[in-house]
Every structure is written in structure tokens, then in C-alpha cells.
Amino acid sequence: MPVTDSPPTPAHDVAVVGLGPAGRALASRCAARGLSVLAVDPRPDAVWSPTYGVWEDELGGLPSSVVRWRVSDPQIRVHGVHPLRRPYVVLDNVALQAALPLDGVEVRRARLDDAEVAALRSEARVVVDARGARPGGPAPDDPAPAQTAYGIVVPAEASAPALQGAEALLMDWRTDWSPDPRPTATPTFLYAIPLGLGEVLLEETCLAAAPGVPVEELKQRLRRRLLARGVDPGVVDHPLGREVVRIPMRGRDRPPPAGTLAVGTAGRGGHLVTGYSVAHSLARGESLARTLAEGGRPQRADPTGPADLFREAGLRALLRLDTAGTLALFEAFGQLPPQRQRDFMSRDSGAGGLARAMWGMFSGMPWAARAELVRATLGWPRPGSVRG
């Protein structure tokens, strides 16, 4: 009988491409479970620059050292004031990376394209794409739904007029970003969070728009809002630091390279309505590492489930709601019981809890706002609109 050569055994159990929160969490947890891990990133030693915040109860087994600042009583403000009764923490990125060590991981410094990621299948039993939603960089005139934000870091004492007595504002939907008392443009909210060391982040955020609201417009809205509240113009124009955020809401919105798994925003790890992904990525790193260590290989890191149908409907509504409808929606959210709020905000909530949360929001809205929400969700034209 003819003798055929067997394919060579891969040198690694797992190859992880990209060392942001999703990739580093997975690589670290896989190595801790005794797997042979290759990690590839163009800047593997870089400290993450975005401000990451999670609910305190989502920290899992991470040490307290990863918390940069803790907010015990964050608020949402719309027409009323709504304490969330759930502690929120800002993460210390240096400490978080230290809590996810790469001991025993072979680290390779490189930037890979899709074909090169797929080619790693010759080196590892499982290849994971964790390069983020836009591995090639932001696409000009990207039409995909996106969350965008522009923020400034200011001294805590200078932020007091913006916070107006709140410890922190997770979402402040009031419309003082506009000179119009009844604006009709895409609504935005103020995210105002203490960072510790006497600093506060003040960030104007568009939750979701297609295409995303331009950063320059967000910058102008933030300045208008802060000056209207009495913040010193000099502080606004010359802050301690600046931050720009762009999160494609549907992740990469295309299949991962052939034969690979996608984690974090490279796949479906982000929340379709809120854009949040960090808490889920950290938790998924642990559970996926356990599966791989047991010899499993899932077809998808984050498979589609019934809850995703509700989240997709929620995203469609956000993209089409008018300003009044958006404010009514989040006014109703602020009045939900704490468990329903968690069901709505969590990337990992099931379909039942999410459905109950969304029904609670719908039933808490005025009748006119309910009609607007139905219209937006189903894509119906507004009454009186002209079809082209």
C-alpha cells in the first residue's frame, strides 16, 4: 500500500490574533489552563487607551486592583432623575492587563490580514480572531450603525456644573446640547464619570446612528451643553485629555477568516443596543478557555440566540426613533425595576428577561411615544411623510 504523510501536528493549541480585552483575556485564561498559546499583535506591550467601565457585579473573579474608581450611585437623567442602585466601576487598564498575564504565551509582534490569520491554522489547532471590528482601521464614510463619542477629561472641581449634584451620570439625555428647545436631530447624551485622582470624563455620546454622528459635531454639542451649564470655557477648550470613541454596533458585520473563531467586537461580542462589550469579553475569555481546554471547538464564540432578535429590533428602533421617542424610551428605562434594567443592559441576558425588560419600557411610555416606537421598530414611514 502507498504510504502517505500525515499532516504535521500544529505547534500550538490556540492562536489568538489581537491583544485587546477580548484577545488578552482568552490568551491568558488558555495559558493558565495549560494550553500552548500563540498570541499575535502589532503592539503587544501597549497599554489600552479607551476608558472602560463595567458594572461592579460583572467583575467576576478579577481582583479589586483592576478598579480605578467606583461609583456607588450612578444616575440616568431624562425628564426625571433615576438612580440606578447598582455600583459602576471604571477599570484601571494597567492593572487589568496585569491581572491577565501572558506567562507562558508565545507572543509574536505582527499585524495580520485575513489571509494571514487563516494561515495560522497550520500552527494552531484553534485560531481566534480578536482584532476588533475594523482591523484595517476606520473605513471612510462607513455606513454601518455605530456608536460615536467625543470626551474631555477635566479637573473634578470644574466638572461640578455639568454633574449638577450627581455622583456620576451614566446617561444624561437632556437636550441642552441643542439651542432648539425641541431638537429633531439625532439625540445624544452626556456620559459623566469620575476617573479618580481628581479627574472626571465628560463625554458626548451618540448611542447609535447610521452612519455614526461625526466627532466634530459631537465636540460642538459637548461644548454647547457644558457652557449652558456653567462649565468654564477655558477648561472645555483646554482639557487635561481627550477621548474619541467609535464602536460599530454589529461588530465586524462579516464572517471571520475561514476556519477561525471571532471574539469580542471582531465577532458578535458587543451589545447591539448599548455597544458595551468589555464585561462580556472578559467573561467569555474564561468560559471559552475552559471549553478549549476540554478539547471542544465551538463553531462560533458567540452563537446567535433568541435574545439577539430582540436586540436587533432594539437597534432598529434606536436608528429610526425621533428625539422625543428616544427620550421617552430611556425615561421608561429609568423607571424599570433594577433586575429589568440589568436584563436590558447585559450582553448575556436571556430572551425571557430581555423581552420582559423591553415590554416594561414600552408599557411605561406615553401612547404617542409607543406609536413612534412601533413605527421605528417596524420601519413604517411617519404619518404625513412622502414616499419617493
Image: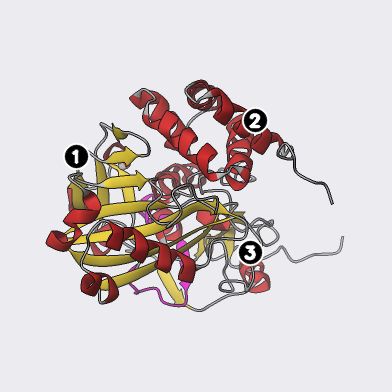
Tag of residue 374:
2
Asked whether the viewer can see residue 344, the reply is yes
| Distance from Cα at disc 2 to Cα at disc 3 | 46 Å
Residue at horizontal 65%, vertical 45%? 299
Q: Amino acid at mark 1?
A: Ser
Q: Residues within 10 Å of mark 3 (few under 14, many from 20)?
A: some
Q: Residues within 10 Å of mark 1 (few under 14, many from 20)?
A: some
Which residue is denoted by mark 3 in the rendering?
Answer: 121
Nearest to the eye among marks 3 and 1: give it. 1
Left or right: 79 with respect to 121? left
Q: On the image, which quarter does residue 257 sit in? A: bottom right
Q: On the image, which quarter does residue 76 sit in? A: top left
Region rendered in magenta: 28-48
Q: Position of residue 229 (x, y in %)?
A: 26, 56
| Distance from Cα at disc 3 to Cα at disc 1 | 46 Å
Which residue is denoted by mark 1 in the rendering?
Answer: 72
Q: Amino acid at mark 2?
A: Val
